[in-house]
Image (spheres, coloured by chain):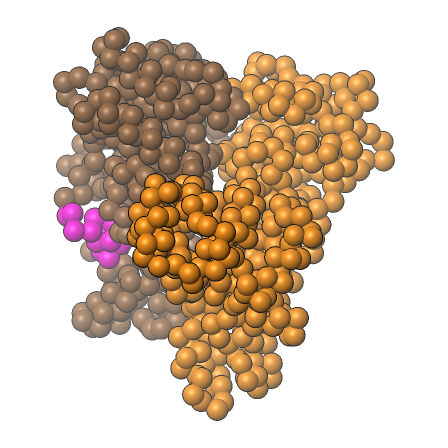
Chain colours: A brown, B orange
Amino acid sequence: MSFFKKLKDKFVKEHDEHEQATDDTTTQEDNEEQTLANETQETESTSSSFDVEEPDGEVHEELSEAEEAAEQEGIALKFRKGLEKTRSSFSGKINDLVAKYRTVDEDFFEDLEEVLISADVGVNTVMDMIDELKMEVKRRNIKDTEMVKEVISEKLVDIYYGDDQSGETEELTLNPDGLSIILVVGVNGVGKTTTIGKMAHKLKQEGKKVTLAAGDTFRAGAIEQLDVWGERVGVNVVKHAAGSDPAAVIYDGIRSAQSKNADVLLCDTAGRLQNKVNLMNELAKVKRVIEREVPGAPHEVLLVLDATTGQNAMSQAKTFSEATNVSGIVLTKLDGTAKGGIVLAIRNEMEIPVKMVGLGEKVSDLEMFDPHAFVYGLFADMVEEYEEEK
Amino acid sequence: MAFEGLSDRLQGTIQKIKGKGKVTEQDVKEMTREVRLALLEADVNFKVVKDFVKRVRERAVGQEVMESLTPGQQVIKVVKEELTDLMGGDESKIAVASKPPTVIMMVGLQGAGKTTTTGKLANHLRKKQNRSPLLVAADVYRPAAVDQLKTVGTELDLPVFEKGTDANPVDIAREGIAQAKEDHQDYVIIDTAGRLHVDHELMDELQQIKQLTTPDEIFLVVDSMTGQDAVNVAESFNEQLDISGVILTKLDGDTRGGAALSIKAVTDKPIKFAGMGEKLDELEPFHPERMASRILGMGDMLTLIEKAQDQVDEKRAKELESKMRSASFTFDDFLEQMDQVKNMGPLDELVGMIPGANKMKGLKNVSLDDKQLVHVEAIIKSMTKHERQDPSLMNASRKKRIAKGSGTSVSEVNRLLKQFEEMKKMMKQMNGMQKGKKGKGMNLPFM
């Protein structure tokens, strides 16, 4: 494990630098350029501060307050770190492309198309974008590929934000006075239970009283898995025996949350492939039970999507929305080599906002989705270069 | 359907060249572009697509397509042949060690379905090959992963070796094998923790397990919904572990599964099995030709027929076939069919397997909710014997009576009657298609 070892070695030496790096983070918004200059250094020192605390990659230990504080400060950096792979490969490719072609012609567009497709952006979105790009290039009479780079990033940002130009972080919708219910849905193996564990940790840190309902009564070991998370995070878990009616578990979860005056109830559900009509009906029933018991609930229906998923993610978003009226997406496993391009397609075609992203295996590796940080992360290299040229 | 199949995609181009006497190179270029898009939409990696399309184009520009009277069909044929070729043959064999136990290692990303597949594979070994496997729980990281494998073991009534979550996975694997020797189990399946292919620490752990246990098979378990990233994952696992085969999971979903092609292309390792459902007996040998059809969005007739064969007894099937041929299919047959179909799986899935089904007029409006079957059943059961034999008897008052009897409405009865007619039409078309197949290549109804 040379990479982690290197970081560990560096940690002692760079401790002072880390202090400074964290200060820089706070000023990041006002002074992006300065942050850029410190980029490499920051990323390294942040990762060292976390990895050294948990050398085995274990997540169970309760985090001390000091560690938590350090973590808060490092959030923006962590986001960048998680996206590092995404960014370097994606913008790296666009840079390769620009270096390869001198003039903007058909071949150039064809290769650009491939770069975008390889990021799982989706064929339709890419085609639309290429068409718009071609128009734009014509309109502005751009001949040099260096110039087109800027237009590419502009267009991608456009696609991402769509009509909603605000680009604000989408917060979770919670009931300010009383119980908030969050229903978590998705296909098998995307990370629903893990996401719930991480969310419970996050909400608890914000001072909320959290209850979990073990609605996945189907998969072997799912109830135990949520139970372990409940213990780790220190929250109450409502569960029935395996194989029982999920709607009944959720019902009991609501009753328990109400009697204990909980602020948030997180409802786990069994993973299901979206083409299984019966299972989707079961999910709709779970939602109806929630609606009936608590007016205005569920306050959020979060669809968990695996970032490595290809075009099928769109079908998942569509079908789960039909059954449960999905209000937001949690994109998990973004710390792998998955490109995250699917996010563009989802926003573009579904208008369902991404609310959170999973950036690692640790309990704290769940962040609110920040479109600015995301898009900025994707284009940091390109932007940087552009500014230098200026 | 979210995606157009290759055949739909080629429609436009084919329409254009239909009137022409000769197919030009430009036409072929356009057609291969559609091939490219279809494959990309199916999540085949773009590099793999590029090589593939190049090969297809070479063949197409040659004599084969341009001189053919039906260039559209010819292109599809070339594509499918190349695709099946690339996908390799049926190879669902599992190695047997000369000295038992045979050790199988299951590896893959988080959430690919390793633990479930471990159970399915063990079940397959016992049921189909009469073996006695031992399951080894080496996933000590994910909460309750050990519990999950234990539950699977209990369900299958198979032994599970575990040492809780504090032990080292390498030790667990070694001791598991020792245990199997002692108990005379002839297979050991090691369920490892899901990990990212870029996580060096955990990949090292897998290499250690490999060195220590010298497995006879290392199966990479891959989610069939994986996108472009499948190439990176497969390449990386193969480089570091030299995997011996691939198991695709969640193929019972509606993904086109282009990842299969990508993985095969970059690793050149056989795809051996496919996970087709959540139950522990739903593991099937992988069929390259069917996968090729699926990736192209051309339906999966063979699986449909096989599914039907599982449910229908042969004598009745023959009778039914002749009825289908002569289109003298009645509501009684329909009712009987429905019971069988219900056992075959969700309706929309079945219809999805019929090539060209999504092109069929009217069928699109047929709602494929399984719940509706109950209503349909009630309606048919409220018909008289004569009515069931001869739907043309229907008039307003009969319909009213049936609606009353079944607790439905006249419009629902009407809808069923219409659907029934459409179904008959569909049968005729399927019939024609099968005949065509016997002739040469494909003869899809819309061309």
User: Is residue A162 highlighted in magenta?
Assistant: yes
Looking at this rendering, what residue extends furthest in the top direction? Answer: A260
- Residue B217: x %, y % from top left: 71, 38
- Residue B238: x %, y % from top left: 62, 44
For image coordinates 49% across by 86% down, the residue present is B23
For image coordinates 54% across by 75% down, the residue present is B73
Q: How many numbered badges does the structure rendering display?
A: 0
Q: Nearer the viewer, residue B31 or B237?
A: B31
Q: Is residue A66 above or below residue B149?
A: above
- Residue A246: x %, y % from top left: 40, 24
> Residue B23: in sight, yes or no?
yes
For image coordinates 18% across by 43% down, the residue present is A167
Q: Is residue A56 above or below residue B302?
A: above
Q: Main secondary structure of the magenta part?
A: helix
Q: Is residue A216 left or right of residue B353?
A: left
Q: Quadrant of residue B222?
A: top right
Q: Is residue B185 above or below residue A98?
A: above
Looking at this rendering, what residue extends furthest in the bottom direction? Answer: B21
User: Is residue A160 highlighted in magenta?
Assistant: yes
Q: Is residue B412 left or right of residue B198?
A: left
Q: Nearer the viewer, residue A186 or B61?
A: A186
> Residue B232: in sight, yes or no?
no
Question: Magenta stretch?
Answer: A154-165
Q: Nearer the viewer, residue B120 or B172?
A: B120
